[in-house]
Amino acid sequence: MIRVERLSQVFHSRDGGSVVALHDVSLGVERNEFVSLVGPSGCGKSTMLRLVAGLIAPTRGALEIDGTRVTEPRRDIGIVFQSPTLLPWATVAENVLFPLQLMREGGADSRDRAQSLLDLVGLKGFESRYPRELSGGMQQRAAICRALIHDPAILLMDEPFGALDALTREVMSRELLRIWTENPKTIVFVTHSIPEAVFLSDRVIVMSPRPGRIAEVIDVPLERPRTFEMEGRSEFQDCTQRIRRLIFGADDSAVSGSAAA
Ligand SMILES: Nc1ncnc2c1ncn2[C@@H]1O[C@H](COP(=O)(O)OP(=O)(O)OP(=O)(O)O)[C@@H](O)[C@H]1O
Ligand SMILES: [Mg+2]
């Protein structure tokens, strides 16, 4: 569904310097596949999502969705950013409906749809509240509803649980899998948590920094539905170990404990 071929992205600064954010990256994502991107800070993960979303144009290479070159933001894509970025003056329901308002759509069925999404993520009863009245985790759940309101075929998520505490994060990842199972879509998910990537994904794309490239693509050999008990399995641990080694090198004893937790 998503085809990335020999993509490179160079950013130029005003003082004449340049940063190669991505170099010669090729990648394919199947329809309804769940793929994660992991890699050190600055390796180009967000840049990759912004390219797929059509928010920036690649310096070199080809990027296609369903056989069509991406040249501008597409309406069949939903994006969840690291921070919820809700409109402070709008209620939760208004925030969720905002993309439809921009697309000049909406009406009674979209309000029903917003309601059922909010129910799905456990925000029933908070429709008329303002973002400041919600916890961080609740705001992020509202942002996920907003990304899903137009039923996009592709969901791009940039560290959506990065600001959440560990418990909420577990609840949210289970919730995300439930939403994805009930309503399949292609998901590209960026995270700094290696176990989270393995738990959620069909494949984990491990990136290396400066310039950002794909170090390896790891197939996760765990069946679905996923359960947290699977984290104790040797297949799970083999995956996380392999990814840690790719990111931190062979001797990961000093860093893997904190950096990958
Ligand atoms: N608009 C921009 N202008 C100039 N440089 C940029 C721009 N966006 C990203 N970069 C540079 O491109 C590189 C990759 O950035 P990117 O945000 O994609 O990394 P990342 O993998 O998402 O990092 P993090 O894990 O910290 O979010 C970085 O060196 C960054 O400084
Ligand atoms: Mg980023």
Image (cartoon, helix red, strand yellow):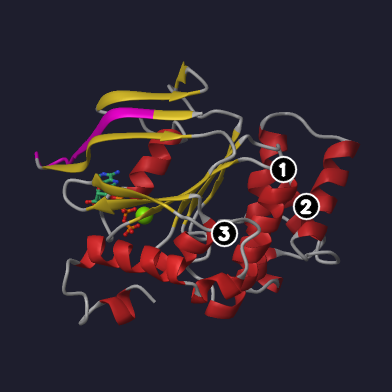
Instruction: Return the disc, 1 or 3, that comes first in the chain's sequence.
Output: 3
Identified at 46% across, 61% down, the residue is 198
Q: According to the image, label 1 marks what residue?
A: 149
Relative side of 189 to 211, left or right: right
Q: Does residue 91 show up?
A: no
Identified at 21% across, 75% down, the residue is 252
Do callouts 1 and 2 mark residues in contact (Cβ within 8 Å)? yes
Mark 2 residue CB less than 8 A from any atom of ligand 2: no
Instruction: Find residue 249 and report its horizontal and vertical position in percent.
Output: 17, 66
Q: Secondary structure at mark 2?
A: helix
Q: Where 58 falls versus 259 (above or below)?
A: above
Which amino acid, by three-letter code, is at mark 2? Leu
Q: Does residue 17 show up?
A: yes
* Residue farthest to the left, as pictured: 16
Instruction: Return the disc, 2 or 3, that comes first in the chain's sequence.
Output: 3
Give me the C-alpha separation between circle 1 and circle 2.
Answer: 8 Å
Q: Nearer the viewer, residue 10 or 221?
A: 221
Q: Residues within 10 Å of mark 3 (few under 14, many from 20)?
A: many
Which amino acid, by three-letter code, is at mark 1? Ile
Identified at 27% across, 61% down, the residue is 40
Q: Quadrant of residue 140?
A: bottom right
Q: Which residues are magenta?
A: 4-16
Give me the C-alpha separation between circle 2 and circle 3.
Answer: 16 Å
Instruction: Find residue 134 and report its horizontal and vertical position in percent.
Output: 69, 71
Q: According to the image, label 3 marks what residue?
A: 84
* Residue farthest to the top, as pictured: 68
Q: According to the image, label 2 marks what residue?
A: 117
Q: In front: mark 1 or mark 3?
A: 1
Instruction: Find residue 33 and report its horizontal and vertical position in percent.
Output: 54, 42
Magenta segment, prevailing SS (helix, strand or loop): strand
Q: Secondary structure at mark 3?
A: loop
Magenta region includes residue 5? yes
